[in-house]
Image: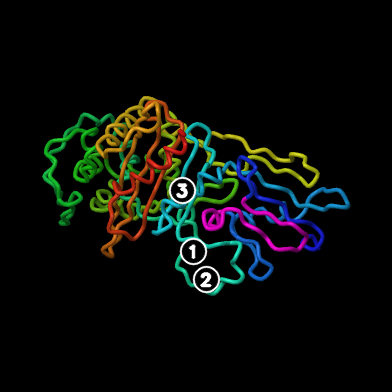
Amino acid sequence: MYEKEYVRGSILDRKGQPLAWSEEAGGKRFYGCTHAASSLTGYYSRIYGTSGLEARFNSLLSHSSSPEKKKRGADLTLTLDRDLQNLAYEQIKDYTGSVVVLDAKNGQILALASSPSYDAGKLEENWQETDQMEGVFISNAFQNPVVPGSVFKLVTSRAVLKQHLENKTVRDRGWLKVNGQTIHNYNGTEYGTLDWEEGFIKSSNVYFMSLALEMGAQALDDAAGDFLLGEDIALDFTTLHSTWDLGNREDNIVAATSFGQGNTLVTPLQMAMITQSIANGGKMMKPWMVRFVTDGRGRVKEVGKEELLKKTMEAKTAQKICQAMTEAGEAYDLKEIGEEEYRIAAKTGTAQRGDGTNNAWLVTFAPADSPRYVVVVNRLKTKKIGKSLTPVAEKIYEELFR
């Protein structure tokens, strides 16, 4: 009844630019961001139903208090920036992956792009072709937890610093034998004697395995809990899932988990949350998407707000990780951005999938000395490494600071 009588409400970006809208009751749905935002907005179809934001907020979009002569559903205004969303998608559209952009201070989601994607406005005529595309209806940004690789060393670093072991040195010969299994650094590189900061910047698997085995499984378990790994996290537009499993806590599982292999699976949005909490002095803000809801009479009915989700660490601990990420960003040759020449703090990851391909990761924030934004990029099923994603992050920051 509502669909026949009410013009479906619009989904708008933070500037009021339309992402989805209708022009008449029961009529066609139009999409202003085509492929770039379809994995987020989802689709509204008289044939195939609804998905994404169209499904989650269907009752609000379908109807609201309106004048009798012009019945309208409620409008959703998001924290998302349509232009930034388009730019993010353009950077990844040729491969399977995602981009997440957060406000480092308040947790607002500024971009949440995923590839592959589809044109929601042409879904009905292209359904058969679209439906055959692998993973096209799942957002790689927030619905597809995957192996994180060395970006997980942010979590292990939390444990190392909590135990005050940052000055502990390890002799890195490029490999470590654990329970009869020989585990190598990426490409088998030998780094020599390392403390925590050197091990972080050079991304030594041997260093982090050695420290994890010394600390024990419980230290990793506690650090994972500090970042809500393995817990369902209810947000205003979705619920995040991740996998945290140390199995029977055997040494080889603890060792592999310490550098992001093991059984850990996490989404880019949750890695962005982890990164944001470090950039924000140990305060993890709940990511949020809906700025406000406006009813059919133009009255604001609901307003989103920032919310502290969890204190993940002390500020001095966060500052130490920030410094290590800043040094790592320089080691990755991330360029300085904007007229102010802001530095980008970063950590890369290259997770082996077991099928001869990698998950490439890059987690960042900038400016390094006074963080305003968090940008996380990943690329799945690739031969590339995490450092290959630096041009994507640089492009995003250029737009943010422009």
Task: Verify CB contact (< 8 Å) between mark 2 and mark 3.
Answer: no
Q: Is residue 40 rendered to the left or right of residue 30?
A: left
Instruction: Name the image quarter holding residue 336.
Output: top left
Q: Is residue 107 rendered to the left or right of residue 324?
A: right
**From which residue to which does the magenta span run?**
19-40
Q: Regarding mark 1 in the picture, which secondary structure is present there?
A: loop
Which residue type carries mark 2?
A: Asp
Q: Determine whether 17 is above or below 28 in the image.
A: above
Which residue shows up at 68% across the image and 54% down it?
21
Q: Please, which residue is most extreme toward the right here?
A: 68
> Where does label 1 land, which residue?
136
Which residue shows up at 52% across the image and 69% down it?
130
Indicate the position of residue 84 as horizontal and vertical percent values.
50, 44
Q: Determine whether 235 is above or below 8 in the image.
A: above
N-term-proximal mark, 2 vs 1: 2
Mark 1: give few (<14), some (14-19) or many (20+) Cα within 10 Å: some
Mark in the foreground, 2 or 3: 3
Give the CA separation, mark 2 to mark 1.
8 Å
On residue 131, the disc is 2
Indicate the position of residue 25 as horizontal and vertical percent values.
78, 60
75 or 169: nearer the eye? 75
Q: Determine whether 160 is above or below 383 in the image.
A: above
Q: Regarding mark 2 in the picture, which secondary structure is present there?
A: helix
171 or 99: nearer the eye? 99
